[in-house]
Amino acid sequence: MRFGRNSTGGQSGRLYDSSSRFRKARKIATILETELESGLSNRVGLDVGCGNGAIAYYFKSCSRAFFGIDSAHEFIGKFDTKDSFLLGGDGVGLPFKDEAFDVVICAQVYEHAADAPGLVSEIRRVLKRDGVVFFSGPNKYSVIEDHYGLPFLSWFPRRLSSVIVRIFGKGQSYDESPKSLKELETLWKYFEIKDITHQIIANPTKFGLDREVRGMRWTSRIPVAILVALRPLYPNYNWILRKRLQNAVVDS
C-alpha cells in the first residue's frame, strides 16, 4: 500500500510548504499537550504519511523521540538528518514492533491509502495500550473538495470525478477516497473517538489557525450545540483516538 498522493493535485504544494506544515504541527502539539497528562516531553511518537518530514521534525524537538514514515520518497529529505528519523515505508507494513509508540499522528493520510483498514490496523498495532492517535482527514461530503478546490468533487463516483479533474486542468485522475462521518467512525471502530473539531472551529486562534480560517471567523460565533449538530457536514475532522482495550482486529 502506498499513501498515494497525486502529485498533480492541489495538495502537493502544501506538502512542500514547510510554513503550512509547521502551523499544522503547532495545532497538533496544542491538542496533544492538552490531552496528555504529562505532556509530550517523555513520549515516543510516529507521523504516518509524514510528507516532507516537517511535522515529525517539529515534534522531534519537544518529545523524547519522534519518527516519520512515508512511501512517497520524493517528499522525504529536506528535514532528514544524520540520525535518520525519517523513513521510507509502507503504512500497511510499518517497520516497528508492537506497542512501540506513545503517540501516532495520522493527518490527512487515510484518503490517499489504497488499504485504509490495513493502515488503521497497523496504527493500532504499534500504539501502546495507553497511547493516543491524532487523526485528521476530510469528509466525503465536504462542499469544496480540499485537494482540488472543486465543489462536490468527492460526492461523485471516482470515474466521473476524474473526468471533472481533467476538464478543469487539475490533473489526470481523482485518486483520493474520502469517507463520510459514519464511514470514518466504522474505520476507527476499535478506537474510542473524541471529536475536537468543533473546538477548533469555535476557537481557531487557540490552535494557531487564523490564516487557515480567514474569512470564516464568523463560525466562532455559532453556538456549540449547533456546531456539534452539524458534524456530518464538517469539511474536515480532527479526532483524538484511544485504543478500545479488547482482543479485536480491524477487519480487512
Image: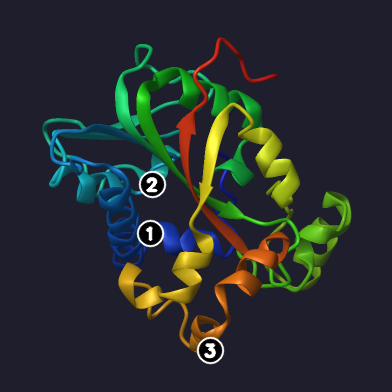
- For label 1, count other residues whose C-alpha is less than 10 Å away and answer few (under 14), some (14-19) or many (20+): some
Relative to 222, say whether 224 is above or below: above
Label 1 SS = helix
Q: Which mark is residue 75?
A: 2
Distance, label 2 to label 3, CA atoms, is 36 Å
In front here: 22 or 239? Answer: 239
Q: Which residue is mark 1?
A: 16
Q: Residues within 10 Å of mark 3 (few under 14, many from 20)?
A: few
**Label 2 sits on what residue type?**
Phe
How far apart are the two marked residues, 1 and 3, measured between alpha carbons? 30 Å
In which quadrant of the rendered image does the N terminus lie?
A: top right
Q: Residue at x 48, y 57 (%)?
A: 196
Contact? badges 1 and 2 (CB < 8 Å) = yes
x, y (%) of residue 96?
Answer: 35, 16
For the point 34% across and 68% down, which residue is it? 207
Q: Which residue is mark 3?
A: 218
